[in-house]
Amino acid sequence: IAGITQAPTSQILAAGRRMTLRCTQDMRHNAMYWYRQDLGLGLRLIHYSNTAGTTGKGEVPDGYSVSRANTDDFPLTLASAVPSQTSVYFCASSRGTQGDEQFFGPGTRLTVL
Amino acid sequence: GQNIDQPTEMTATEGAIVQINCTYQTSGFNGLFWYQQHAGEAPTFLSYNVLDGLEEKGRFSSFLSRSKGYSYLLLKELQMKDSASYLCAAMDSNYQLIWGAGTKLIIKP
């Protein structure tokens, strides 16, 4: 693994189903983030983790949950998907939280029908 | 509230110079980032300014005025590969990034 990876690349999901988006980084970064990107809108922060074992809510956390059991992995779970969660989801990581650049994964394109 | 404003789209000619402006209003301020995003790809880091002034990095420069809540990204000697969206993001008092919707830059030969 080099950098930050996400899986799956894309997914079509029926409304009401549970889905976990995976994110793994091998840079030993402390902080990790989940964003969604919708046409015409800026990236919006869903959840973040400043260090392993801690998580926090971003701007649009409703309907999503995260965990950070170790440094490398930061999965995002949709407990019961709804069509408004159709979006491109980006995972990102940074060495620290104060002015460090964020490195982004390739994204997951999720469609909820 | 927190807000980032940048133009939706700009067009420029190959070899020319273009300036993309960004104004921000955030609860506290801990710096201004610019990212480049090609269609269908992830954003990649271009620059970070926390102090007033101009930072130059090759063909790209970024300027910040904290008193005016204003930044710009200057791209020189434009190449076709510079066709992309350019994202402005301000870091607030909680060290979270507030993102603009992006400026789509179209380069014409």
Image (tube, grey):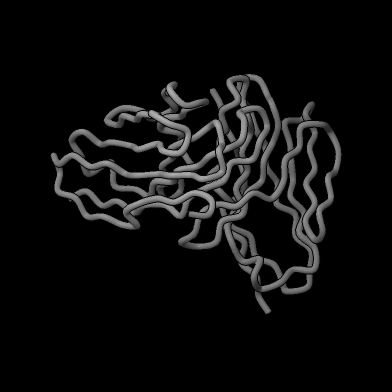
B43 over A62 or under it: above or below: below
Q: How many numbered badges does the structure rendering display?
A: 0
Residue B42 image point, x, y percent:
51, 54
Residue B91 image point, x, y percent:
63, 30
B66 over A15 or under it: above or below: above
Residue drawn at x 69%, y 36% as measured from the top left:
B32
A57 over A44 or under it: above or below: above
The quarter of the picture where residue A21 lies is: top left
Foreground pick, B12 / A90: A90
Residue drawn at x 80%, y 43% as measured from the top left:
B63
Left/right of residue A73 with respect to residue B61 in the rendered view: left
Residue B37 image point, x, y percent:
56, 56
Residue B79 image point, x, y percent:
71, 72
Left/right of residue B50 with respect to residue A79 in the rendered view: right
Residue drawn at x 54%, y 22% as measured from the top left:
B1
Residue drawn at x 53%, y 54% as measured from the top left:
A2
